[in-house]
Image (cartoon, rainbow, N blue to C red):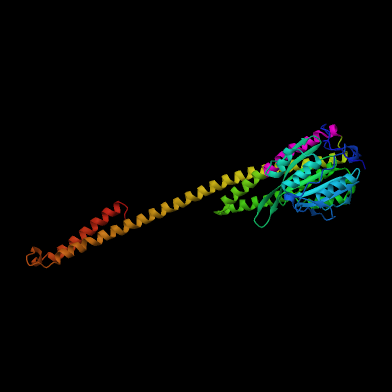
Amino acid sequence: MSERRRTPRPTRRYPWLRPAGMNRADAAPRPAPAPPGPPHGGPRAASADGTPRDLDERSVVDAAVYRDGRRVGTPGSLAATYRRLREEPGAMAWIGLYRPTEAELLSLAEEFDLHKLAIEDAMEAHQRPKLERYGETLFVVLRAARYLDAPEEVDFGELHVFVGPDFVITVRHGAAPDLSAVRARMESTPELLALGPEAVLYAILDAVVDGYAPVVAGVQNDIDEIETEVFRGDPEVSRRIYELSREMVEFQRATRPLVGMLHGLMAGFDKYGTDEELQRYLRDVADHVTHTSERVDGFRSALTDILAVNATLVTQQQNAEMRALAEAGFEQNEEVKKISAWAAILFAPTLVGTIYGMNFTHMPELRWVWGYPFAILLMAVVCVSLYVIFKRRDWL
């Protein structure tokens, strides 16, 4: 194997999809990086295969070297992966990382000539879905999603993918997607894996898009439940609508850019000589993304309509409650008027009887023969008069 030169790789534009048969031996060789010194002068750690290394590579989920679609090596460190890739003509490295350190990303950047802007994006995360080309390397940012049944919410993860002529590097910032399943699927179909890094990128895109299907189903079920709660008058439904609407905004940000990204890839099929089988696969992924994006748009519209209906129902309920309170107050007022009217009627004879019951010596009516009949008649006249007055005023 010839020694690789310590010069940067050519800056000419490479297709992101290598033509069939092109391998690492066809490209300009890369120099072997000089082994870095131990941090702070301390001893260097050793990898699983006994080679020294300086990086704490616990974030390396899996690193493998493939040739002709079959795994030919599973190095125990990044340094060992670099060396094994140089030793295998026509091989491809697939390195999977989970929240790597800055030192690990810088090591990868030095070995594979990754652009510093792409490395900065991979370090910071929280990027929008995008596809960018840096010379011969393609940098893809994806937003994966998964539906959590227990809390009934959508969890989003971020995935960065570096695709070069002979390598694929995946950097995950979240639990989704499960790339171990993607790797197992590709290793079970070596004829597809033999197509190179572009096939791995297809498989990753397909896994991310397929992961949207359970989310769509879960959200659809949530919307059905919300509709039932709205017409049932659940007081907590407004909060649930708001939270689900926010998740749909995030879901829209994850899926909508993918439509343009995949159409951009498909537009370069002829230019970059993409394998026909991969063209069919990517078109299928694009169809699924378009369908998912349309469903998400429909969910946002449905949630907006449900929120409007819920506001209308709440207003109607409040109006009904106010009307019921007003009717109760009116009925209570009618009862108070009746009680007041009868109290006034009963007070009149009490007043007459009280006056004539004082038994003062000098009261003209005390010794009058017609005094008692007059008092009774006076009580009756006052009571009847009050009754007639209250009756005319609808108090009785």
The image quarter containing residue 364 is: bottom left
Q: Position of residue 359 (x, y in %)?
A: 11, 68
Q: Which sits in the foreground, 46 or 25?
A: 46
Q: Position of residue 60 (x, y in %)?
A: 77, 51
Q: Main secondary structure of the magenta part?
A: helix
Q: Which residue reaches farthest right?
A: 1
Q: Which sits in the foreground, 238 or 211?
A: 211
* Residue 232 higher or lower than 2, as above or below: below
* Residue 185 higher or lower than 383, as above or below: above
Q: Which residue reaches farthest left?
A: 362
Residue 389 can be seen in this image? yes
Task: State the count of labels.
Answer: 0
* Residue 306 higher or lower than 378, as above or below: above
Q: Is residue 77 toward the left or the right of residue 250 in the image?
A: right
Q: Position of residue 302 (x, y in %)?
A: 63, 44
Location of the C terminus (image quadrant): bottom left
Q: Which sits in the foreground, 28 or 217?
A: 28
Task: State the extent of the magenta-drawn residues as a range.
Answer: 251-272
Q: Which sits in the foreground, 79 or 282?
A: 79
Q: Within the magenta stretch, is there residue 259?
A: yes
Q: Position of residue 139 (x, y in %)?
A: 76, 39
Q: Within the magenta stretch, is there residue 112?
A: no
Location of the N terminus (image quadrant): top right
Residue 296 can be seen in this image? no
Q: Is residue 194 toward the left or the right of residue 322 in the image?
A: right
